Image: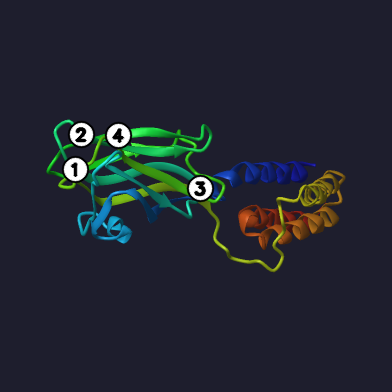
């Protein structure tokens, strides 16, 4: 009975340990992929100019009339949870003019103000926390807007040197796929749980060899499923311990 208790303690320890070693958080950088200019004239650079810090920049001049400047930047293919928006930009305009930087909030269907750019000959590097804004739509896009609501002056312009969105997501190496199981399927989860639990019950009933075989087989299925690679390895290890233990 002492040996059975020992195996049970090892099993519980491995289950507690698994969540701390099976996930890896990865930081991702997302660039602006397109720009839609509603009002203004693009005079130099492209959207690709905003992907490298302190290099070439993208410039758009104001147009006469109201608004003087209005354009949106789309950041597509965003993975995981967004954290920060980094912008290095400047507005060379009148003393009483400004350009509002806004982000689209999908939950309220409205624009959320992040910053007002005032007249300045120098670039401003700002980091904005956007983790609290529901800004990623169902197509994994984020929409940013630069809006100068006053009448435009053609000698005024807005420059963007750098514009990126940071996000975090869980990464699991795509190691094996031959026995990969769909753990979004509730039935698969129930069946695998019954399979593992039946092996544990058999171990408690002193049928260590049979229980070990069942646990080992269930571990092999999990071993070839990338998301559960670690717990699969631990189940196989525990199964072998049970199988080769003397009753």
Closer to the N terminus: mark 4 or mark 3? 3
Please give the residue where the numbered disc 3 appears in the rendered image. Answer: 80
Left or right of 96, for residue 167: right
| Measured Cα–Cα span from mark 1 to mark 3 | 41 Å
Q: Is residue 245 visible?
A: no
Measuring from the top left, give residue 212's x and y in whole percent. 79, 55
Q: The N terminus is located in which quarter?
A: top right
Residue 91 vertical placement versus 214 (above, below) = above
| Measured Cα–Cα span from mark 4 to mark 3 | 24 Å
Closer to the N terminus: mark 4 or mark 2? 2
Q: Is residue 174 visible?
A: yes
Q: Secondary structure at mark 3?
A: loop
Q: Which mark is residue 97?
A: 2
Contact, mark 3 vs mark 2 (Cβ under 8 Å): no
- Which-is-in-front pick, marks 4 and 3? 4
Measuring from the top left, give residue 74's x and y in whole percent. 41, 51
Q: Nearer the viewer, residue 41 or 231?
A: 41
Quarter of the figure with residue 68: top left
Q: Residues within 10 Å of mark 2 (few under 14, many from 20)?
A: some
Measuring from the top left, give residue 136's x and y in whole percent. 50, 44
Q: Which mark is residue 36?
A: none
Closer to the N terminus: mark 1 or mark 3? 3
Please give the residue where the numbered disc 4 appears in the rendered image. Answer: 115
Please give the residue where the numbered disc 1 appears in the rendered image. Answer: 153
């Amino acid at each position: 009975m002492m040996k059975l208790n020992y195996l049970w303690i090892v099993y519980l320890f491995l289950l507690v340990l698994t969540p701390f070693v099976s996930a890896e958080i990865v930081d991702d950088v997302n660039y602006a992929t397109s720009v839609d200019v509603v009002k203004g004239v693009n005079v130099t650079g492209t959207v690709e100019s905003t992907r490298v810090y302190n290099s070439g920049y993208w410039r758009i001049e104001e147009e006469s009339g109201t608004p003087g400047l209005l354009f949106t930047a789309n950041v597509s293919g965003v993975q995981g949870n967004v954290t920060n928006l980094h912008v290095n930009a400047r507005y060379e305009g009148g003393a009483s003019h400004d350009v509002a930087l806004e982000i689209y909030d999908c939950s309220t269907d409205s624009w959320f103000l992040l910053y007002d750019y005032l007249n300045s000959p120098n670039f401003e590097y700002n980091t904005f926390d956007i983790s609290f804004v529901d800004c990623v739509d169902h197509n994994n896009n984020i929409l940013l807007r630069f809006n100068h609501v006053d009448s435009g002056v053609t000698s005024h312009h807005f420059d963007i040197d750098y514009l990126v969105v940071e996000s975090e997501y869980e990464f699991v190496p795509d190691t094996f796929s031959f026995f990969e199981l769909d753990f979004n399927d509730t039935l698969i989860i129930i069946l695998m749980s019954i399979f593992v639990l039946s092996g544990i019950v058999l171990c408690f009933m002193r049928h260590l060899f049979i229980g070990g075989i069942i646990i080992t087989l269930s571990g092999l299925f999990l071993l070839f499923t990338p998301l559960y690679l670690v717990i699969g390895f631990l189940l196989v290890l525990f199964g072998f311990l049970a199988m080769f233990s003397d009753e």
